[in-house]
Image: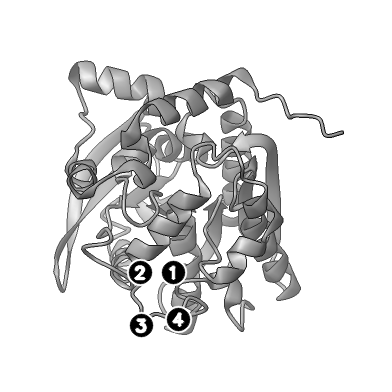
Amino acid sequence: MTTRLRLPPGVRAIDRLMKANKIFSIERMDQRALERAQTAVIPDAGLGAILAGLIIGRARAGVTIATSSFPAEHGEVPLRIYTPDAPGGPRPVVVNFHGGGFALGSSRQGDWICSTVAADLDAVVVSVDYRLAPTHRFPAAVEDCYDALVWTAAHADELGGDPERIGLMGDSAGGNLAAVVAIMARDEGGPRVLHQSLIYPATDLTEGLREHESYLANTRGIVLSNADLEIFRGFYLTEDDDPSDWRLSPLHSEDLSGLPPAVVVVAGLDPLHDAGVRYAEALVAAGVPARVEDFHVMPHGFLGFPYFSRGAKPAMAAIVASQREALAR
C-alpha cells in the first residue's frame, strides 16, 4: 500500500493556480496564446505590478533596478540590472538567465531572486532577456547568454562590479544556459567564471530524460508536466540537432573538469530533479566542487513563487552562501 504525499498548502495553491489558468501551461497554448505570452510585459508599477508581486514576489527593498541592453550581431539584447543602493564596490557580478523552457519568460519574472542576490550578497546582478524559441531556436539563446557574459565582464567597472569576480545563475532553462555558458567560457578562453548557481536546471534534453525516476514519477505535473517538457524541447531543438550535444545537454559533456564550483538546487516534485542531481554528481566526479540543495516537497519553479513556497527563502540563503564563498574577497 502506498501513502499519498501530502502537499504543503502553498504548493497546493500553486498547483490550483497553474491548472486553472492555461496561460501558465505551454501544453494548452495555441500559436496566438504563445505569441501573447512571449510579448506580454509584467508592469513595473500600478495594479498589475501589485498583483504580479503577490504571485512571483516583489523586488527587495534597497536595490535599484535599471533596464539596459548590449549590441549583438542580430541586434540589441535587453538586460535588467540590479544594484544595491548602499555605497560600495567594486562588487561581485552575477549574470542571470531566466527560466521558461527556452520559449517563455523574461528577466522581469526574476525580480525577487535577482534582487535577493543583489541585496544579500552585495552584488550587481545582470539578467539577460535572450531570444526565445520557437522563433529563435538553438543556438540563439546560448549565443545571447555567452555574449552577455562577455559584455558584462568588459563593462563590469561601469556597472560598479569587479570583472575578476563573476558568477553565473539560472533557473530551469536558464540553469541549462548557465551550465553551458560556464563550459563555453572555459573552452573559448572567455571571462573567468568563479561560481555557477544552477536552480532546478534542465541538464539533459536527450531521450534518456524519460528514463529518470523523477520523470516517471511526475504524475501530478505540478507547475511542469512531462507534456510541457516535450513541447519545450520540440520548440528549442530542430530535427538536425543532436540532443546529446553538450550545448543542449551539459550532462552529456565529455569533460566537466576545470569548471567553477556549483550549487545545484533541486525540487523533489520536479521531473528534472534527477537530471540536476546527476549533473552535480558528474561535476564532483570531474573534480569540481558541487553541492546539492534538495527540497523534497517543492515543485519545479518553486523559487518563482516565494510567498507560496516555504522552501524559497532557505533555497536563496543556500545559493547566496555558496556564491559568497566563491565570490567574496
Label 2 vs label 3: CA separation? Answer: 17 Å
Q: Identity of the amino acid at label 2? A: Val
Q: Identity of the amino acid at label 1? A: Val
- Residue that badge 3 annotates: 240
Residue 296 vertical position relative to residue 6 in the rendered view, above or below: below
Image quadrant assignment for residue 86 = top left
Residue 190 vertical position relative to residue 200 in the rendered view, above or below: below
Q: CB of mark 3 within 8 Å of CB of mark 1?
A: no
Tell us which disc is closer to us: 4 or 1: 4
- Residue that badge 2 annotates: 142
- Residue that badge 1 annotates: 181
Q: Secondary structure at mark 1?
A: helix
Label 2 vs label 1: CA separation? Answer: 7 Å
Residue occupying the point 19% across, 61% down: 70
Q: CB of mark 2 within 8 Å of CB of mark 3?
A: no
Q: Identity of the amino acid at label 3? A: Asp
Q: CB of mark 2 within 8 Å of CB of mark 1?
A: yes
> Considering only order in the chain, which callout, 4 or 2, is on the residue closer to the N terminus?
2
Identify which residue, 262 or 98, lies in the foreground: 98
Q: Secondary structure at mark 4?
A: loop
